[in-house]
């Protein structure tokens, strides 16, 4: 059985299962926002909130997501603009339109295969 561990400064520590965050979505998937009219390709995932407190506090309290969930970095677009978005998992849905994402940086990071999926370009992982 797989035992999750953390390695820091050469020390191996077993992680309790409650510390393991499983992301619902993965890099390259196209998602849409649950409440706002935008969609995008995921290019990075944080296991939990990792932005500034100022950014977090700028979200109205009644719709502010919890921090203890995955957050996704998106190459996003709406009818008017393309931009980078930072979105909590609770606010994302899988985009099933099959339409390409028109963000100008998509082709820098991804190759769109014959089935329409975005695959990270070789050498772009960290």
Image (cartoon, rainbow, N blue to C red):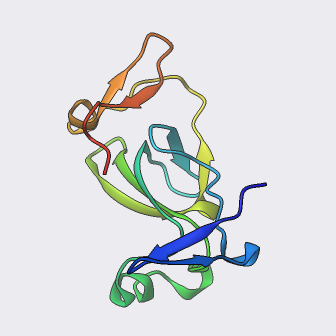
Q: Position of residue 87 (x, y in %)?
A: 48, 63
* Image height of 24 relative to 107, above or below: below
Please give left or right for residue 123 compared with residue 5 in the image.
left
Residue 65 seen from this side: no
Query: Residue at the spot x=58%, y=48% of the render?
Result: 25
- Asked whether 53 or 28 is in front, the reply is 28
Query: Residue at the spot x=42%, y=28% of the render?
Result: 118
* Image height of 65 relative to 2, above or below: below
Please count the marks in the image: 0
Query: Residue at the spot x=43%, y=89% of the render?
Result: 57
Q: Position of residue 73 (x, y in %)?
A: 39, 57
Q: Position of residue 110 (x, y in %)?
A: 31, 31
- Asked whether 118 or 32 is in front, the reply is 118
Residue 105 seen from this side: yes
User: What is the quadrant of the N terminus in the image?
Assistant: bottom right
- Asked whether 25 or 121 is in front, the reply is 121
* Image height of 39 relative to 55, above or below: above
- Image quadrant in which you'd find residue 123: top left
Please give left or right for residue 31 compared with residue 101 in the image.
right
Please give left or right for residue 36 compared with residue 100 in the image.
right
Residue found farthest to the top: 114
- Asked whether 88 or 10 is in front, the reply is 10
Residue found farthest to the front: 10
- Image quadrant in which you'd find residue 62: bottom right
Q: Position of residue 37 (x, y in %)?
A: 48, 49
Residue found farthest to the right: 1
* Image height of 122 relative to 71, above or below: above
């Amino acid at each position: 059985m797989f035992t999750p561990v953390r390695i820091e400064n050469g020390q191996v520590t077993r992680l309790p299962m409650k510390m393991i965050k499983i992301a619902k979505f993965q890099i390259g998937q196209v998602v849409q926002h649950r409440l706002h009219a935008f969609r995008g390709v995921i290019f990075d995932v944080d296991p939990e909130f990792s932005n500034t407190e100022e950014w977090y506090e700028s979200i109205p309290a009644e719709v502010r997501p919890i921090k203890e969930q995955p957050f996704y970095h998106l190459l996003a677009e709406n009818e008017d603009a393309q931009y980078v978005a930072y979105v909590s998992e609770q606010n994302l849905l899988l985009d099933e339109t099959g339409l390409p994402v028109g963000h100008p940086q998509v082709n820098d990071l991804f190759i769109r295969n014959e089935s329409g999926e975005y695959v990270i370009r070789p050498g772009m992982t960290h």
